[in-house]
Image (cartoon, helix red, strand yellow):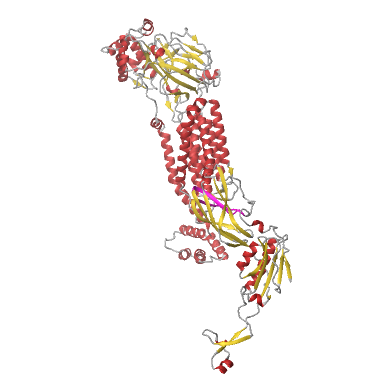
Amino acid sequence: MSTSTASETTTGRAGPEGRGPGAALRGGGPGHQGPGDLTLTSIVLFTLGAYGVAAGAATGQEAVVAVGGFAFTLFVVGIVWPIWSLARLQVAVVAPTDATVGDAVELRIGITGRASRLDVRALDPPGMWCRTAAPADGRLPHAAARRGVFRSVRVQLRTSAPLGVFVRTRTVRITLPAPIVVAPRPSVAPAVLQPVPDERVSSGSTLLVPGGGDTVRTVRPYSPGDPARLVHWPTSARRGEIVVREQEPPPALGIAIVVDLRGGAPEVAASLAAGIGTATLAAGGVVWCGTFEDGLPVGETVTDARGLGRRLARAGSGAPAEPPARWPTRVVHA
Amino acid sequence: MTRKVGASSGSSTRRQHVAPAFRVVAIPAMLALGSVGGIAAEHAGLPWIVGAMGGALAAVLGVLALPSIPTRRATVALLGLGGLAALRHASFAGNDRSWLLVLWAGATMLTLVLVDRADAETVPALEGGAPLANRFAETARVGGVIAVVVVVAAVAFVPTVTDRLGRHVWPGLDPSEANSAGAPSSLHSSGDLSLTTRPRLSAAVVFTVDASRADFWRGSTFDVYQGSSWSSSFRDQLEILGHDRTKVQVAPELYDEGARSGVEFRQTFHVEAAFSEVVFAAPSARLVETDKLLIRSPDGTLRVAGSSSGFGKGAVYTVYSRAMPVTEAKLRAADATPIPTPITEEYAQPPATTPRVAELARQITTGAVTTLDKVRAIEGWLGANTKYSLSAPLSPRGTKDVVDDFLFRSRVGWCEQIASSLVVLARSAGIPARLVTGFVPGTPDALTGRFVVRERDAHAWAEIYFPGIGWQGFDPTASVPLVGNSPSGGSWLTVARRNAVPLAIAAMLVVLLVAATPHVVAARRRRQDRRASWSAGALHRLERAGRKAGRARAPAETPREYARALAERLGDERLVAVGDTLDAALYAASGAPEEDRAVADAVLTSL
C-alpha cells in the first residue's frame, strides 16, 4: 500500500464544518457591512435640521424652523425609506447542484416586492454588487470558494434610495431547494493504473477498460454487426457456418484512494485525491474512494469525476473506510 | 474633463469622465444654489437675480468642474452650503422671496435624488434584472411622498409648534444711537410731519406682521395743520403706561366707540429695522405685549419711552386692537348722532388755509348729505383732479400752504399731499378729520403668511370721526378706502410684474441653458468618441487635413477611398498606406498592426 500526504501550505479550513444549513462560510470578509451606514448627506441634513430647528426656536423665526424642519424631514425620510423598502422584499435563490472550488457559479435570484433600486450580491465570499429594481429575476455571479455541501446561501441587499441619506444593508440567508455540492479542485496528478482484483470488476460497479484483451475465450455463431476481423475462419470452415471469436475482457486497472482528512491540510489532501482520481478515471481506470462522511466511514467505487467530486465534497475529518483487499491503494493524508 | 466619482459607499475614488447621470445633477443643483443665492443677495441689498446667477454658477462649477473631488461629495457639500445660506437668510429680514425658499427645498430634494440615482448607476446591472425606473418618475414619487410628509407634519404639529415657537414678545437687539440716527423718519415719533421734504422710500424691510387679515398699520396722528407741516397738539400730554409683566393695557381714546367696544384683532410685529420708536398697530391698540416701557398719546397712538430707545432688530411685540366693523349704511346712519363737542373743537375747526381751499371744500361737498358722502365727494374730486407721483416736485421754497399749492397749482403729489388735502378739505367742510401716518399692509409672504412691510410702504392717510363708531380711515391715495375689510396687498402676479426684467433675463438664461445642454453634451460625446479609438482619431485628423486642402470627405466615401483621393490631390503617396491602415483598423478583425499605426500617425502629423 502506497501513501501520499498533502504537504503543501493550506488554508487550514476543514471541510465538514462548512456543511449544512447555517454553516456556510461566515465572517463576510472584506466589504461586509452592518445593517446600515449613514452617509455624508445624512450628516449635512441632520446638522442643518438640528441647527435650524434649535436656532429658529430660540429666536422665534418660523422660516428658519421651516428650513430646519425640511432638512430634518429629508433626513428622516432618507432613513426610513430604505429600511422600509428593503424590509418588504422577499428573496429566493436557485443554485446549480454541482460546482468545483474556484468556479464561478451563477445563482438565479428572484426578488419580490417593490423597490425603485437596490444593489444585491452574494456573500461567502462577498461578490460584486449588482444593481436592479424590484421585482426582478436575474443571474447573480458567485464564486464557489470552499469545498462542501451548502444547503443555503447568504445574499446581501442594500439601498440608499431615494435620497442617499442612509445605506440600508440587509443580509438574508436563503435555503436552497437543492444543495450545492462543491467539489475540490483537482490538483495536477498522474493517473494510477494498477491491476485490481477481477471479482471486484465483475461486480458490475466498475467500468472495463475499452478495447478488450487478446485472449480468445470461445467462439460463437456470427451475429449481424460483429466485425469481420473477429471471424474465426478455421472454425467457420470446419463447422460450415461463420463463427466469431469471443475474447476475454482486459484486466481492470485502477486504484483505491483512501482520503484521510485528519490533519492540517484537508483541502490540499482533498484536492490531491481529486487529482489522482480524476486522472485515473480519465485514463480508463477504476477508482475506489474511501472517506469519512457524516460520522461514518464510507468506501465505494466511483464511476465518474462528478461522483468522485461529490464524495470528496462530503468528506470530513475522521477515520476513512478501509480499502478492499488486494486493491492497490493510495492513502492521501491531510 | 475627468473627475473622481464615488460609489455610494464612498469607497471608490476611481477617476473617470463625469457620467451623464451626474451631469444631470448640475441642473437642480443650479436651481438650489441659485434660489438661495437670490435670497442672500436680496438680504444683502443686491438684486436677487445677481445672487441667483452667482449661486447657479457656483453649482455648475462645483458639480462639473472640480476634478479632484468626487461628484457626490462636491454636490452634497454644495447643498450643505446652500442649506446654511438658507438658514442664515431664511430669517431674511422678512422679505417676500419665500418662493425662492420653496424652490430651494424642491431643488435640493431633486438634487439628492438624482445624485444618489447617478451613484447607483455606477454599479453594474444585475444580469437579467429589472431596469431602474425612469429617474423623473422616481423623483416625482419621492417628491410626492415628502410633500405628504411635510403636509401631515404641518397639520399635526404646526398648531402646537407655532404657539411654542412663534414669539409674541421678544426683546430683540438694543438699538444704538447710530441706529436711531439712521432710521427713516417714518420710524421716529417726532410729533411733526413736514410736507416739504421727500420721504426716504427704500426696499428695506421695516417689520413683518403676523395677522389674520391686512390692515393699515397706524403710527402717529396729526391734528394741527400749519401750512407746510402737521403737528400733534398732544405732544405734551403723554402718559407712561404701566406694565403687568409683558402686558400693557392701553386706554381707549375718548369718544372712540370702536376702540372701546369694537372687535378684537391681534397682530404680532417682528421688527426688522435696526430702530423703530413707534409702536405700529392697526387702529386702535388696547393691549400690547412687550417688554418695553410705552408712552400713550391721547389720540391712542403709542411709542417706546425714552429719548433714543425703541425696538431693535429682532424685537417682537403683539398688539390687540379693537375697531368697529362698519358698512357704508352704518357710517351714513352715524350722522344722526351728534358729534361730541371736544371732537368738534379739536378736529373740525377750519384749518389755517387759504379761502380758495375753503371755497373748494364748499363746492365739492355741496349736494352731499352725509359725512360719508362728503368724504366720498372729496375723494372723488381728488381722484379726478390730482395725480399721484412719488417724484412730484416739492412745493417751491416759501410756499405757505402746501395743500393750496397742491390743489390749485401742481395737482401732483404723493400720499402726504393727497391725504393732507382730504383732511384740510374735510375740516373746511366741518367734518372732524386728522392726518395719520404709518404703513400700508405690505406684501403677504407665501411661506410664512406674514405681511412684509418695507420702508417704501410708508404711507399717510386720513381718519374721519363718526359719532358712535369712532375714527375711520380713508385713503384717498388708493382706489380702495379703508372702510370695511381691506384687501390683502400683493400677489405672485404683482411680484412677477415688479421683477419682470430680471425674470425675463433669468427665463432667457434658462432657455438658453436648456437649449444648449444637448449640444454641449453631444459635442463632448463626439470628442470623447474620437478620443476613444485610434481609428476614429486618425480618421478625424485625415478629414481635417482634407478639409484644409479643400477636399472634404463625401458621406459615402470609405477611409481608403478618401485617403487615395487625398493622396492624388496632395501628391503624397504615403496617404494611400494611411488609408489602408485605417481600413484595417476599422474593419479587420485583428485591427491594424502597431507599426502601421505609428507610420500613419507620422504621416498625419506631417500633414
* Residue B199 appears left or right of B592: left
Residue A189: image x %, image y %? Answer: 68, 69
Work out whether residue A90 or residue A139 is closer to the camera in this orientation and state it. Answer: A90
Part of the protein shown in magenta: A114-132
Residue B273: image x %, image y %? Answer: 50, 22
Task: Reply above or below: A7 against B437.
Answer: below
Residue at (58% x, 90% y) in the render: A232
Residue A72 seen in the figure: yes
Task: Reply above or below: B166 against A45.
Answer: above
Residue at (54% x, 43% y) in the render: A83
Residue B66 seen in the figure: no
* Residue A156 appears left or right of B444: right
Residue at (63% x, 67% y) in the render: A308
| Quarter where residue A212 is shown | bottom right
Task: Reply above or below: A223 against B133.
Answer: below
Residue A177: image x %, image y %? Answer: 55, 57
Work out whether residue A10 or residue B469 is closer to the camera in this orientation and state it. Answer: A10
Q: Main secondary structure of the magenta part?
A: strand
